[in-house]
Amino acid sequence: MKCYLCGSENHFKREGKVREDHSINILECKDCGLVFLDKQNTGDVFYENNNMIDEKFFETTKRGGENLDAKMREFYIHNAVFVQKRFELVKQSLVGKNILDFGSGRAQFLIKAKELANQVAGVELESRVKDIYRDNNIPLFSHLNEIGGGVRYDLITAFHVMEHLEDPIAILRQLAELLRDDGKIIIEVPNGNEALLSIYKNKAYSEFIYTNVHLYCFTPHTLRLLGEKAGLKVEFVKCIQRYPISNHLYWLAHNTPNGQKQWGSFIDNPLLQNAYEQTLASLGATDTLIAQFSKQ
């Protein structure tokens, strides 16, 4: 099987399991370092029907709730913390600008961005979110080819989307066509070299974090290579830590997620978290990567 990024057939099997299907192998390219699955069994219909976040997802990730609706509400309340961090990161670039969020989900980021931007729009396959966009007066497209000719954006964002795409290079090229000459593309992805995998080598975590919807796991190097393969200028790749130190300590102690709910109140504080994030970033081992691309 050839590596998507560099075409090499020189790879090895990573430790760990895909939580939904243990028959899927996790491969790492020996030449460029891209991590990828040897089977891809998702697609447009899968995401249109929101099969990514279902009862099995909540069972596996140990997220409680009386019923599916309650679990969904709790999930998006939890996700709002990450949305706020993204907003804070880019808010200076939103003022008076035209914004497109690719893979915009339930419009959590766009609702915030709308307060500062000139115009916002989203691209999202999931069918049941349409009412959210209508109620917030935000244009919604199901596919990029639905966007009218001549429309250009100052900023295009894609938060935790590229790892889901069969051909992210092609999508980045399409996004670049919608970008103004001085525009920016900001993408956020999970880091395939995060500390629980690369430093602590936690076996339980390696059998939890890989999922069949993440076709690729990028690293700082392969994320940069992705942008270059799409013909874009890579302005930066930054290492960001989303989950606090309590989450890592709980994994190491109990081999289970959601440690921030159990220990966060007495372990996590901004000073400690900032120092921990800086340490992990210096090692390229944060759980999240953010990159900014522009036209050449």
Image (cartoon, grey):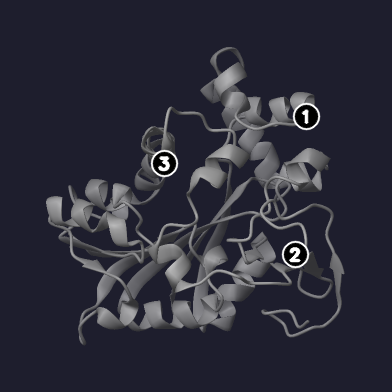
Q: CA distance from mark 2 to mark 1?
A: 25 Å
Q: Name the kind of residue labelled 2 in the image.
A: Ile
**Label 1 element class:** helix
Question: Which residue is found at the position 40% from the left and 39% from the top?
Answer: 72
272, 85: nearer the viewer: 85
Q: Quadrant of residue 279?
A: top right
Q: Name the kind of residue labelled 3 in the image.
A: Lys
- Can the viewer see residue 276 in this picture? yes
Q: Answer with mark 2 or mark 1, whichever residue precedes in sequence.
A: 2
> Tag on residue 85?
3
- Could you tell me residue 241's position as x and y percent? 58, 41
**Label 3 element class:** helix
From the viewer's perspective, is residue 129 above or below residue 235? above
73, 275: nearer the viewer: 73
Question: Which residue is found at the position 77% from the left and 29% from the top?
Answer: 252
Q: Which residue is mark 1?
A: 252
